[in-house]
Amino acid sequence: MSLALIAVSVVANAGTGFAQSKTSATPADVLLRSMQRQTSVNVLGIITQRDGAGTGITQTIRVERDRNGRSHFLVLAPLRHQGTESVDNGARSLVYWPDKNVIIDQDSPSKTPCDAQWRMALTQKNYRLKFGTPIKIAGRATRCIEATPIDSRMETRRFYVDAATSYPLRLELLDANRAVVTLQDTKEISYPADVAADRFVLKPVGAPRTMKFERPKNTNATQVERVLGFAPVIPKVMPMGFAMQEMQVTQSDRWRSVAIRVTDGLVRGTVYQWRSKGEDREVDGMDENSVMKVGDVRMMIVSDLDAPRRQAMLEAFVESALADGLLDLSSVFLEPDPVCRRFTWIQNRYEDETSTVNARYSLRKETTKKT
């Protein structure tokens, strides 16, 4: 069970209620309200959510939130994840893994500025938004916003939000044939007048080990090179309309890496880069991911993008390094297994395109010299 499943769920964002009348609100207005961090109401619900580890298993989660931004998520099913829970009291975010008997104690995301406005501006660059057909979900009237990507490599997303509260109730993906895949759905929802304060206190069984982390500070490429000993590979232009949100150095002594967080406004991902010498360590607890080798630097993207789109993102990072002359093309490899446990590297399609890419790069260097 990963942190992302509970802490970065769509339902972790919640609307603040309608500031405009329903008739004057645009699709962007409605979607933006559903992306706000705090709610205008208390929330009690049961949701189903696709497993982020790529297993195809649907998880059932009990959700409790209050209008002050506190939250409690408890996994009810499947049995192997039952009892995993996350509590955010506004100061700290605690995730309890009963099968590992571990609590992850981190800064609450609510202590950082909400980026909803910035993400909405990016969304409007990358998607065409329109109202879809409203339906009832868990007995609630909804408004439907359909986001059609401008880049054909991305998928259409359909958001259903509560018509009265702007709270997100369902997220669907539509493929090229308009086949629908439900990523998240609401089975029960209510808005109680009060939520007891003790609902936001974690009460694990026994005496689990606590691992405490402070939120890493944002950094830049120069500082990363000074701390980790290598310059991070960052594309000048990312594919599919993605942009970099922030860059941070992870705090784990076992796995020193830089985390580059990217988004296209609606879809998020994190590209980890770290120097690897000799045998690679296992990287546990990650969601759907793809891995690539750039010299002695490993890159791994963790995102709910599918494998081809994750690969396209990594290739954009590699293309940037090629354009800047930072790597030897023969050192680029791709990890074929979508579940990253023990890295074994095989050459990816760059090996078949070596002459084409090298020729393009050589021509670029010659042109630069002449000018």
Image (cartoon, grey):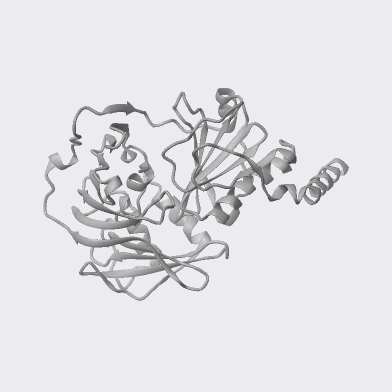
* Residue that lies at the very extreme toward the bottom in this rendered image: 133
In what quadrant of the picture does the N terminus appear? top left
- Residue 62: give x, y in percent of width and height: 22, 52
- Residue 275: give x, y in percent of width and height: 59, 29
- Residue 301: give x, y in percent of width and height: 52, 44
Instruction: Decide if residue 366 is on the left or right side of residue 148.
Output: right
- Residue 340: give x, y in percent of width and height: 50, 41
Q: Quadrant of residue 333?
A: top right
Q: Which residue lies at the image location 46% right of the left edge and 54% below the top edge?
A: 267
* Residue that lies at the very extreme toward the right in this rendered image: 370
Q: Which residue lies at the image location 44% right of the left edge and 27% below the top edge?
A: 251
Near-viewer residue (102 or 274): 102
Instruction: Decide if residue 101 is on the left or right side of residue 334.
Output: left
Q: Which residue lies at the image location 59% right of the left edge and 51% below the top edge?
A: 311
In what quadrant of the picture does the C terminus appear? top right
Question: Is 314 rendered above or below residue 147?
Answer: above
For the image, the number of numbered tags is 0
Q: Quadrant of residue 130?
A: bottom left
Q: Quadrant of residue 2?
A: top left
